[in-house]
Image (tube, helix red, strand yellow):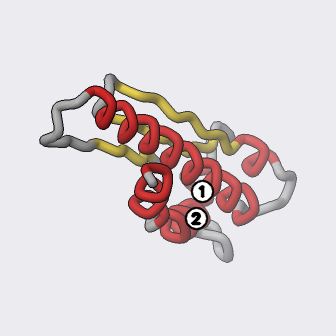
Amino acid sequence: MKITSKWTTNLKTKEVENAVNNASKATVKDVVILIAGDAKRGSPWLTGNNSRSIRFKVESYGILETEGQVFSSSGYGGWLELYHKSKAGYFRRALEAHMGKLPSGIKAKLN
């Protein structure tokens, strides 16, 4: 799953652009860490392999875009997400629980 923060501003000062960029990067990272943690806790557990394989990364592409990814490298994390009898949707639930924190997190870091 990917989360992308893209923004534009009509203010042309580097100081404002840098402040928004830094707040965006930090907030995307904070939210991605929360999502990954919830996905690990919500992952179906037999051997724990899938839960241990859940990772995240945050990358910036220039000053206008930050992307966060949460993923399973177990090879069957997608199947568990869609089809597990009791835990299907563990990534989706983690995403839904924390996505709303992006705008308020960015705003809080700018104050």
What amino acid is found at the position of numbered circle 1 in the picture? Ile
Q: Is residue 70 left or right of residue 54?
A: left
Specify the farthest residue to the left. 10
**Circle 1 residue:** 35
| Picture quadrant of residue 20 | top left
Seen at 58% across and 64% down, the residue is 94
**Circle 2 residue:** 94
Q: How many marks?
A: 2
Q: Badge 2 local density, few (<14 within 10 Å), some, or many (20+)?
A: many
Q: In the image, residue 77 lies at what x, y percent?
A: 62, 50
Q: Is residue 46 left or right of residue 62?
A: right
In the displayed structure, 98 sits above or below 37; it is: below
Residues at marks 2 and 1 touching, judged by CB atoms closer than 8 Å: yes
Q: In the image, residue 48 lies at what x, y percent?
A: 83, 52
| Picture quadrant of residue 66 | top left
Q: In the image, residue 47 lies at what x, y percent?
A: 86, 52
Is residue 26 or residue 1 the one in the foreground?
26
Q: In the image, residue 57 lies at what x, y percent?
A: 56, 34
Upstream in sequence: badge 2 or badge 1? 1
The disc label shown at residue 53, or none: none
Q: Is residue 30 left or right of residue 104?
A: right
Is residue 97 or residue 17 the one in the foreground?
17
Does any portion of residue 106 appear in the rendered image? yes
Which structural element holds mark 2? helix
Which structural element holds mark 1? helix
